[in-house]
Amino acid sequence: FVQALKVFYRLSDKTIEEKLNIICKRLGFAVEDVWEIFKKCPVFLALSEQKIDNSIETYLGLGFSEDEFKTMLKRCPSCLNLSAETVKKKTG
């Protein structure tokens, strides 16, 4: 709960809305899905577009399908915050 408050405190309403739209478009999630992910991992909304893009590329580059990646993200949203090197070590 405290982490969620910190994220909301740092981001303006406009920024939160923009991030929601970006995440929904890039990952194909409904807004409700993004809020569910945010509840599990509040830092999720604070990630940069570049970090999100890099994470998507890393997982897809390792052979995960988009559906597998989406399922993984819904179950464990913190995986989006891992570095490419960490992901490669853990899956290799």
Image (tube, helix red, strand yellow):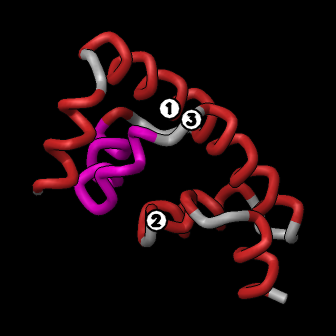
Identify the residue position indicated by label 3 in the image. 48
Residue 35 colored in magenta in the image: yes
Q: What residue do we see at 61% from left, 66% from top? A: 82
Q: Which mark is residue 78?
A: 2
Looking at numbered disc 2 in the image, what kind of residue is underneath it? Ser
Magenta span: 32-46
Q: Are marks 3 and 1 in contact (CB under 8 Å)?
A: no
- Judge from the rendering whether residue 25 lies leftward or rightward of residue 17; answer left or right: right
The secondary structure making up most of the magenta span is helix
Q: What residue do we see at 20% from left, 43% from top? A: 6
Q: Which one is in front, 67 or 9?
A: 9
Give the answer, above or below, for where 41 lies relative to 26.
below
- Judge from the rendering whether residue 2 lies leftward or rightward of residue 20; answer left or right: left
Identify the residue position indicated by label 1 in the image. 24
Alpha carbons under labels 3 and 2: distance apart: 14 Å
Tally the marks: 3
